[in-house]
Image (cartoon, grey):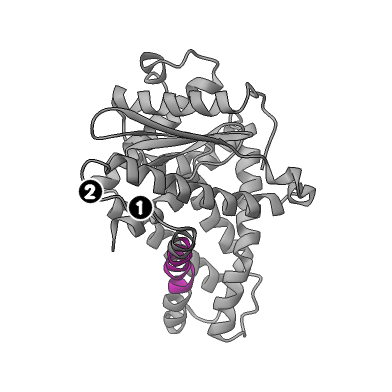
Amino acid sequence: MTRWFRLLLVQLLILAERINVGGQAVLEGVMMRAPRSMAIAVRRPSGEIAVKREEVPPLSERFPIVKLPILRGAVALFSSLIIGLKALNFSANEALAEEEEKEELSSWAMGGTMAVALGFGVLLFFVLPLYLTKLLVPVIGQSNIMFNLVDGIIRVAVFLLYIVSISRMKDIQRVFEYHGAEHKTIFAFEAGEELSAATVQKYSRLHPRCGTSFLLIVMLVSIVIFSLIPKLWPFWMKAGARVALLPVIAGVSYEFLKWSAKNDRHPLVRLIIAPGLALQRLTTREPDDSQVEVAIRSMTEALEENGGYKDDRLVV
């Protein structure tokens, strides 16, 4: 597995939800998104911080229909993947500028890489559990409830095993440190604090809107939605239906994450989001001050490009 492909799979885990200000860790850096802009800050081998920023108008300005509940979640996930891949491409070239030959990806290459990674994720987390559960039918019986429960347990187990496996890789651990820096910086910004390394380091690296929590919610929501697929359908139809239902699952999960983020002080909500926060202990690491400095630079640049727009409106 190439570094590019592995990092893109990690991207699927650490994409942060795009409510207010969100972000994503990249190779030796952080990408931050404000409601109408994005900025990427990357630490070069020389120690210099390279920055790229641009305006990113909300898709809902051109297509108001994407503001609809459920649909906005699917659109937000897809657009986040595209922007995240561009950020990953920039970070790879800047972080490796003095170590390796630059490998600028064309639009076609980026699209192909994303398609392969998404396809691999669908096969690993949705089709494989279905196949393994099908093999277990003689043991678990013909109960539709039991079938979907076992299928869900296998899916979550595969997901956790994948996270544990990649968290042991050295280059991925660096990405997870920048992931922690991203979360801390967003927390400090949301609290209205001055963005300095000393202030940012006081905050937790575990954030309730993190994409890791989002993907765990996806796994759990899929158990309910997949139970609607007729039991008597052949395997290939069930597998196809799962792929077709992924936008619906993403949309429902998005709405739940959005709701839980606004009610995270309620005891019941805290209980519900606790597993996602616990999972972030694997996908984040405590950053050092130099990594926090990069995250702060990315945040500052994104807000400047955003033109001072800092309110809490939801933007897709």
Residue 165 vertical position relative to residue 193 in the rendered view, above or below:
below
Residue drawn 67% across and 27% down? 312
Instruction: Specify the quadrant of the image occupied by residue 265.
Output: top right
Residue drawn 30% across and 50% down? 102
Residue drawn 54% across and 81% down? 142
Which quadrant of the figure contains the N terminus? bottom left
Residue 118 magenta-drawn?
yes
Provide the residue span drawn in magenta: 114-129
Residue corresponding to mark 1: 7
Residue 68 vertical position relative to residue 314 in the rendered view, above or below:
below
| Secondary structure type for disc 2 | loop
Which quadrant of the figure contains the C terminus? top right
Residue 206 in view of the camera: no
| Secondary structure type for disc 1 | helix
Residue drawn 62% across and 59% down? 249
Residue corresponding to mark 2: 100
Residue 171 x, y percent position in the rendering: 25, 46
